[in-house]
């Protein structure tokens, strides 16, 4: 089943064609890699899917329903979580508070927030995820005091707080040490095995090749190639896009 689909999706910033007619299909349960040189439109594609940018043209369907025109909150509530290329944390907030805030952003009505059961659920989920990520013992620590790698893990945890069915990761392994990188790899794999669908943007080729079942290559806002890791790696047009300018 197709979980997420874009059809002829375009996002122009004046004369910059950041996303220029992208047809993308993400299947339920898939672990899809999204690669391409800097400026090829990867993050902008995520911004369109999550409602941060409104597409210039084209469609975005999640479970067959259009996302275009919805707010980021509404889209999150449909079941899409994401991380950002540049980590977005409140440095003075504790690790646990950050997780609870991430849940709250997606809470429905004011009335529903009156039910303390939901707060208990959020706390339990935060505890479960922080334990999984090895951050539970640091729950009272200010987010800004964590190492960069730990902040990346926290950001990942926050994206999971609203119990999404699709998670978009924008460079989860960039700048982290090999230990954290492998931890991240294991977590994504384990969550995927439980049925969570991922789209992962990453420049670390080794990471992407080890992780993903299928890879889509963007170049100048367009899909240049798509296929299994081996095929992408031996595709000369892909290599040219990266190294040939
Ligand atoms: N908010 C914005 N305003 C203007 N131009 C933007 C904006 N966001 C991205 N761009 C431009 O769109 C193109 C694609 O950027 P981006 O999606 O960040 O690429 P990638 O994530 O693949 O490196 C770049 O030329 C970038 O400068
Ligand atoms: Mg980017």
Image: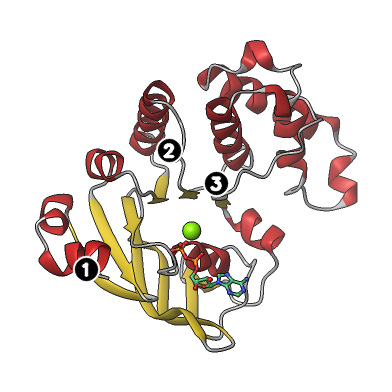
Q: Earlier in the sequence, mark 1 or mark 3?
A: 3
Residue 105 image position (x, y, % from top left): 76, 47
Residue 90 image position (x, y, % from top left): 77, 38
**Residue 161's disc number:** none
Name the residue furthest top.
137
What residue is at 27 percent from the left and 45 percent from the top?
205
2 vs 1, front mark = 1
Is disc 3 in contact with disc 2, using a CB cutoff of under 8 Å?
A: no
**Residue 244's disc number:** 1
Residue 58 in view: no
Measured Cα–Cα span from mark 2 to mark 1: 25 Å
Graded by Cα atoms within 10 Å as few (under 14), some (14 to 19) or many (20 or more), the crowding at tag 3 reads some
**In this rendering, would 160 be left or right of 221?**
right
Residue 211 found in image quarter: top left
Q: Earlier in the sequence, mark 3 or mark 2?
A: 3
Measured Cα–Cα span from mark 1 to mark 3: 38 Å
* Residue annotated with mark 3: 164
Residue 67 image position (x, y, % from top left): 58, 71
- Does residue 107 lie above or below 244 as drawn? above
């Amino acid at each position: 089943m197709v979980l997420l689909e874009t059809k002829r999706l375009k996002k122009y910033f004046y004369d910059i064609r950041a996303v220029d007619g992208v047809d993308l299909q993400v299947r339920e349960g898939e672990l899809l890699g999204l690669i391409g040189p800097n400026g090829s439109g990867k993050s902008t594609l995520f911004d369109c899917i999550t409602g941060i940018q409104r597409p210039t043209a084209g469609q975005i369907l999640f479970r067959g329903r259009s996302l275009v025109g919805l707010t980021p909150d509404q889209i999150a509530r449909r079941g899409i979580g994401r991380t950002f290329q540049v980590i977005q944390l409140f440095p003075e907030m504790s690790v646990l508070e950050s997780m609870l805030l991430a849940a709250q952003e997606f809470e429905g009505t004011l009335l529903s927030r009156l039910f303390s059961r939901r707060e208990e659920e959020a706390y339990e989920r935060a505890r479960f995820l922080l334990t999984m990520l090895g951050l539970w013992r640091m729950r009272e620590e200010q987010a800004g005091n964590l190492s960069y790698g730990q902040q990346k893990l926290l950001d990942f945890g926050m994206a999971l707080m609203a119990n999404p069915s699709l998670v978009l990761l924008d460079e989860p392994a960039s700048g982290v040490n090999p230990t954290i990188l492998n931890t991240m790899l294991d977590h994504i794999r384990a969550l995927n095995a439980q049925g969570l669908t991922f789209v992962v943007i990453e420049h670390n080729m080794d990471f992407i090749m080890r992780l993903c079942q299928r890879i889509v290559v963007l170049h100048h806002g367009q899909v240049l190639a798509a296929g299994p890791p081996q095929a992408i790696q031996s595709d000369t047009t892909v290599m040219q896009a990266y190294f040939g300018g």
